[in-house]
Amino acid sequence: QINCGHIRDDDGTIHRLPSNRGEALVDILRGISGKVVIWGYYQEDIRIICELLEREFGAGSYVHYYGETLSEDRPGAVTRFRDAVECRFFVGTPATGGKGLNGLTVANYSVYYSNHYKLEPRLQSEDRIHRIGQENQCTYIDLAIRGTVDMAILSALKSKKDLATEILDTIRLAIVASEEAD
């Protein structure tokens, strides 16, 4: 949370902290044309991102899709992102929008403002833009501060992904060997 520019105290009060992460996000977004999906792990991340987008790109430039987005507003958010030219950014949490959500393949970029150690939500959120209907190469960008927990999280995600791939490859080889033996 601290790396993202906020912390929640024991009373539940959220305190904003100085952070360059938002500036880095805006710099990246200025260099990308077209639509972008932006993921944040914490709800406060989403609030910060939406404030930045509104200030830098205008109120109509984004939709949000996270715990505080009303259930009845969620389908409209996806439709607006997909269909409205002026709506360039979809901002959400992998917990809310990372699994089973369709309609985001209009974006070629996913930016991770923050991450969590769990691999499955990361892979599911990546799949929101990398699906049938995607006609372009997908690019994933992680905002991370060297020498901090950000790097440990990314390293853990990579090693978990490598391990999962190794296990699946071993299973595939065993299946092929079994089929050849038959």
Image (cartoon, helix red, strand yellow):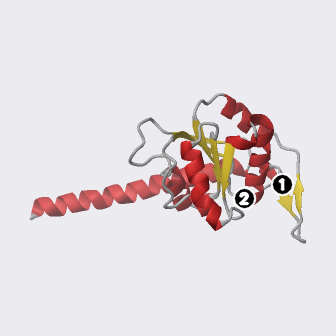
Rendered residue at 58%/38% (across/down): 35
* Residue lying at 56% horizontally and 58% vertically, measured from the top left: 98
Up/down of 48 relative to 12, above or below: above
Crowding at mark 1 (Cα within 10 Å: few <14, some 14-19, many 20+): some
Q: Amino acid at mark 1?
A: His
Q: What amino acid type is highlighted by mark number 2?
A: Tyr
Q: Secondary structure at mark 2?
A: loop
| Residue 152 x, y percent position in the rendering | 66, 51
Quarter holding residue 174:
bottom left
Q: Secondary structure at mark 1?
A: strand
Q: Is residue 92 left or right of residue 180?
A: right
Residue 46 picture location, percent across and down: 73, 53
Residue 82 visible in the snapshot: yes
Q: Quadrant of the N terminus?
A: bottom right
Mark 2 or mark 1, which has the lower sequence index?
1
Which of 65/85 is in front?
85
- 10 Å crowding of disc 2: few (<14), some (14-19), many (20+): many
User: Residue placed farthest to the left in the image?
Assistant: 182
Give the labeled residue for mark 2: 42
For image coordinates 25% across by 57% down, the residue present is 173
CA separation in Å, label 2 and label 1 = 10 Å
Q: Are marks 2 and 1 in contact (CB under 8 Å)?
A: yes
Residue at the (9%, 65%) spot, across then down: 182
The image's mark for residue 6 is: 1
Which dot marks residue 15?
Answer: none
Q: Classify residue 40 as left or right of residue 36.
A: right
Front-most of 68 and 122? Answer: 68
- Where 173 falls versus 25 (above or below)? below
- Relative to residue 140, is residue 160 depicted above or below? below
Report x, y in % for residue 77: 61, 53
